[in-house]
Amino acid sequence: MFTMRKYEMLGFFIISLISIALALLFWALPSTLFIDGIRPTTDSLWQVGKLMFFSTLIYTIIEYFIFGHDFKNFIFAKSATLFIGPLVYIGASYLLHMGLGNASFNSHVITYALALALGQYISYYIMRSEYNFRLMNEYAVLGIVLMLTIFIGFGRSVDSFSTPIFRPMKDYQTFIKYQT
């Protein structure tokens, strides 16, 4: 139990470091079909949520090999962080943007940290309480695969503007880029 609590608290910092490392790695890597599917292709909130999802997924896999196999509800509990973190970040960022008119970089960083902390706490609470019902881990895996599919598909088709429907928009993209 102590190991789980320690890794869940450290997870907040480790996931943040993984996010920074992934962002720098994605920035340095050339564009490929696979990389464009998992990296943030724009600066939108959904793409930063995708970065949080993949960072948390990497940390979840590491955690599973350290102590996760000792808990029957580990995958279900960690799926709470995988789903709640990005959704809370995106929702809170939109609310801040609407409330303040124009949210700053600092408000997005604070929202990111709060969403990640909330997700880690809920995950810890679920594991500690040992909630367990039939097929919950299987549903969690199905949800994780669905989120992976959505994020990768969204990254490949919409944000890369490489599909045939977006090719006429190249001139419009350049126009928008220089209108600030």
Image: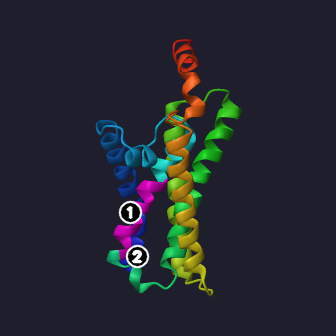
Q: Is residue 62 magenta?
A: yes
Residue drawn at (61%, 52%) of the image? 88
- Outermost residue, right side: 99
Instruction: Please identify the quadrant where the N terminus is shown.
Output: bottom left
Examine the rendered structure and indicate whether residue 57 appears above or below residue 48.
Answer: below
Amino acid at dot 1:
Tyr
Q: Secondary structure at mark 2?
A: helix
Q: Residues within 10 Å of mark 1 (few under 14, many from 20)?
A: some
Q: Is residue 20 magenta?
A: no
What x and y, as percent, mark residue 86? 56, 52
Q: Is tag 1's residue or tag 2's residue first in the polypeptide sequence?
A: 2
Residue 118 showing in the rendered view? no
Instruction: Please identify the quadrant where the C terminus is shown.
Output: top right
Q: Residues within 10 Å of mark 2 (few under 14, many from 20)?
A: some
Q: Which mark is residue 43?
A: none
Examine the rendered structure and indicate whether residue 142 appears above or below residue 96.
Answer: below
Examine the rendered structure and indicate whether residue 82 appears above or below residue 33.
Answer: below
**Is residue 30 rendered to the left or right of residue 134?**
left
Residue drawn at (56%, 13%) of the image? 175
Examine the rendered structure and indicate whether residue 74 appears above or below residue 134.
Answer: above
What x and y, as percent, mark residue 115? 55, 53
The CA distance from mark 1 to mark 2 is: 13 Å
Based on the displayed image, in which of its 4 quarters is residue 84 positioned? bottom right
Q: Secondary structure at mark 1?
A: helix
Q: Which mark is residue 4?
A: 2
Residue for badge 1: 59
Q: Which residues fall within the magenta stretch?
A: 53-64
Residue drawn at (60%, 45%) of the image? 90
Q: Nearer the viewer, mark 1 or mark 2?
A: 1
Residue 9 showing in the rendered view? yes
**Is residue 23 rendered to the left or right of residue 144?**
left
